[in-house]
Image (tube, rainbow, N blue to C red):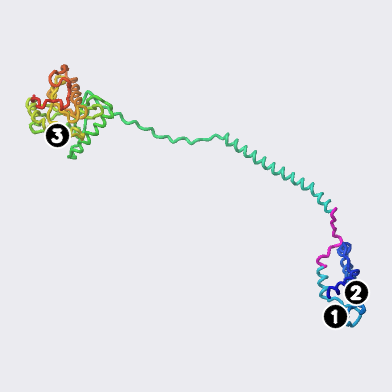
Amino acid sequence: MFREQNKNINEQDIEHLPVYTMMKDLEFINNPEVARKNEESENAPVKKPVSPENLTAAQKSSPFLNPVPTTGDSPIPPKKEFIDNWTDKTDRITISEKTPVLTDQAYSSEKSSKKPLLIILSVLLIFVIAGSGYYFWTAYQRTLKVVETTPITEPEPTPQPEPQPEPTITFSTDKPNYLSIDLTQGNNTAVKDALKNYLDKVSKSGITTPIEFAVTDTQNNPLKFSSFANSLGLKLSSSAMSSLAETFSLFIYNDQGNMRLGLSIDIKNDTLLKTVTAKEEPVLVSEIAPLFMDVTYTATATKFGKSTYAGADIRYINVISPQDLSVDYTIFEKKLLIGTTKMTLRSMIDYLSAKQPTPVSTTPATTGNPANTGSPDINQLSPNPPPAQ
């Protein structure tokens, strides 16, 4: 039913619908007051009388189509609040008549007029960037040249003290040298330490001939043999000590890297000494063991052999070997000579022979072991000890 009513109304009023064009918008912009009045007059409702003949029975009974009784023929004016709100809104969007309205052509021409300015600004910006880069590059190159040309002054090296060469240890090979021992400490270890110190010095000197030492105390007074034997720990019998004088010399010899000691003691009675030493041979190794300077050994042999060298009759026993450790002794030129290797004793004989005014015969002896003119191996000796001389 409502569709039929709307259809009839639309067909009757369609020719009275308002048509909006751009001309009205321009008029509103240029002269808003006049345009507003024209719009109000055009939009005013036009009341057309509805003929009852044209209405159907249902339309006649509808309250929407019955005419509303009015007090006059004039339409109801719009409320004042609506007019005020509309005026406020139009005031806010009112554009001055002097404001230019940009058309599409004007906008396009204005946009094209800005292109040269943008190009110029872009070119200037490129030149500024390029100039800045060139300036910094040249400044950097100048800095590099300054650094390259500036001589680098190295700090002067701190003078280092020149190493002082170790004092050359020199020993006389034809005269006695002094060897001082402190006997106030009263023990064998101190004397052994002093002797080991001199053994090390002779080894560093590189001398391979026997070196004679006159043993003294700290006041450079010559030591008696009895005092030296007691301080070192030698345990010779009283009979042997009574046959020996108090004057003596100590020898140090480098036997192919083995530093060995030797003794040269003056004799009071050589005949008595030969008899005493022959009786003490079984314990002689242990009696003079302090001369070995703590060389490790195992004493197994107790029988001495004999040999001759430079006219001297030698008695010997190999504690380890003739080159490493042995006890060789002889009575030569009224001295008791004791060596701790074969060559230690023989080098002492050569040294003392060179100091004698008359030459000593060096004809090798034909007695004893002909295959070994020195200290032969103990295993080659006869099971019976040789007769005492």
Observer able to see residue 222:
yes
Which segment did they paint magenta? 90-105
Marks 3/2: CA–CA distance: 161 Å
The secondary element bearing badge 3 is classed as helix
| Amino acid carrying mark 3 in the image | Ser
| Amino acid carrying mark 2 in the image | Val
Lateral position of residue 261 relative to residue 26, left or right? left
Q: Is residue 94 part of the magenta span, yes or no?
A: yes
Residue 27 sits in quarter: bottom right
- Mark closer to the chain start, 3 or 1: 1
Residue 322: % across, % down: 19, 27
- Mark closer to the chain start, 1 or 2: 2
Q: Which residue is label 3 attached to? A: 286
The secondary element bearing badge 2 is classed as loop
Q: Which quarter of the rendering shows the C terminus?
A: top left
Q: Which residue is label 2 attached to? A: 46
Would you say the residues marked 3 and 1 are in contact, meaning their CB atoms lie under 8 Å apart?
A: no
Q: Which residue is label 1 attached to? A: 62
Lateral position of residue 157 relative to residue 123, left or right? left
| Eye-nearest disc, 1 or 2 | 1
Residue 10: % across, % down: 87, 71
